[in-house]
Image: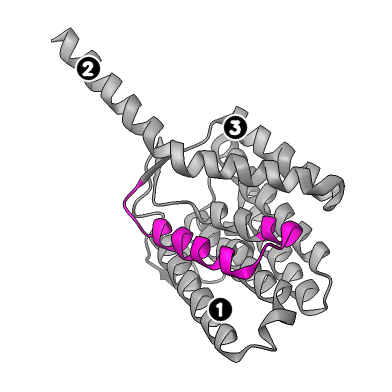
Amino acid sequence: MLVIPSRLGRIPLQKPMVKLLSVADVITLLNAVLGFLSLLMAFSGQLQLAASLIFRGLLAEGLDGIVARRLGNGRIGEYLEPMADLVSLSVAPLVLFYMVYDDVLTSQLPLHVLVGGVLVFSLLCSIIRLSSFSLLKEKSFFIGLPASASALFLVGIVFLKPTIWYVLPVIIFFSVVMISSIRFPKPGLRVNLITAAFIITTIVLDGNYDSLAPLLLLGALAVYIFFGPVYLHVQKDKITGTAKTRK
C-alpha cells in the first residue's frame, strides 16, 4: 500500500479525504460556505443578506473552536481553518464593503483607485495574518489583531454606511494591526457569548431601531482593540509583581 509521509502522519492514498475531517472541521467548512454564499448575495445586490451570512460565518468560526476544544481537532483542522477564514472573514467582507459604496465609486475614478488599493492592502494583510496564525499561536493571547475583528467592522459598516473617507483610514489601521506584534487577549466564554448575542441581535433587527445593535457591536469591538492590549499588560505586571513577592 502506497502512503504519503507528511506532517499529518502517513496517509494512505486510497483513504477518502473526508475521513480526515472532524466535527469541528465540518463547522469550519460551513463557515467557508457561508462566506461564499455571502459573495454571491453581494454580487446580486442583496447586501443585507450578504452581511447576515458573514455574521453567521463568524458564529460558525467561533463555534468550531469550542467544538474542537471539546471533541478534539481533525488531522487537517489547522490547515482548513485559515482557508475557510480567508473566504468568510476577509474576501467576503471586503467585497461587501466595495459593493456597499459602489454607487459612490463608479462616479469618481481617483476614489475608485484609492479604495481598490486599500482593499488589496487589507486582503494581503489578512492572508499574512491567517497563514501565520498556527506558527504564532499562543494559549492566552493573539499576536496581531484577529481577522474576525476586521470582518466585524467591515460588516457593521453595512448597517451604518458612514462617509467613506471616515472608513478608509480605519481599514488601513485594522490591516496594519492585524500583522503587528501587538498582543490581544483571547476572549473567554462569557465574552464570546455576549459577542454572539450582539451578532444575533444585529441579524434579527436587520438594521432597524436606529442601527442600535451594530453600534453596540462596533463599540464593543473598539473597547477590545484599544483596551485589550492594556489589560494584557496590566495582567503581566501583576503576575511579575506576584512572582517577585514570592521570591
Q: Nearer the viewer, residue 173 or 233?
A: 173
Instruction: Give how far across and how far down residue 65 sits, in percent.
Output: 57, 43
Magenta-highlighted stretch: main secondary structure?
A: helix
Camera-near label (1 vs 2) is 1
Q: Are marks 3 and 1 in contact (CB under 8 Å)?
A: no
Real-space Cα distance between discs 1 and 2? 47 Å
Q: For the residue labelled by badge 2, is the local secondary structure a helix, a strand or a loop?
A: helix
Comparing 181 with 35, the one in front is 181
Instruction: In this rendered view, identify the residue nearer to me: 155 or 127.
Output: 155
Q: Residue at x 66, y 63 (%)?
A: 32
Q: Considering only order in the chain, which callout, 2 or 3, is on the residue closer to the N terminus?
A: 3
Q: N-terminal of the two: label 1 or label 2?
A: 1
Neighbourhood count class around disc 2 (C-alpha, 10 Å): few under 14, some 14–19, many 20 upward: few
- Disc 1, SS: helix
Dot 2 amino acid type: Gly
Q: How is the image coloured?
A: one colour
Q: Is residue 93 left or right of residue 227?
A: right
- Residue 246 lies, with reference to residue 211, above or below; the image says above
* Residue that carries the numbered disc 1 in the rendered image: 115
- Range covered by the magenta-colored residues: 155-182
Name the residue carrying label 2: 241
Please tell me whether mark 3 sits on a helix, a strand or a loop.
helix
Amino acid type, callout 3? Val
Q: Residue at x 80, y 72 (%)?
A: 41
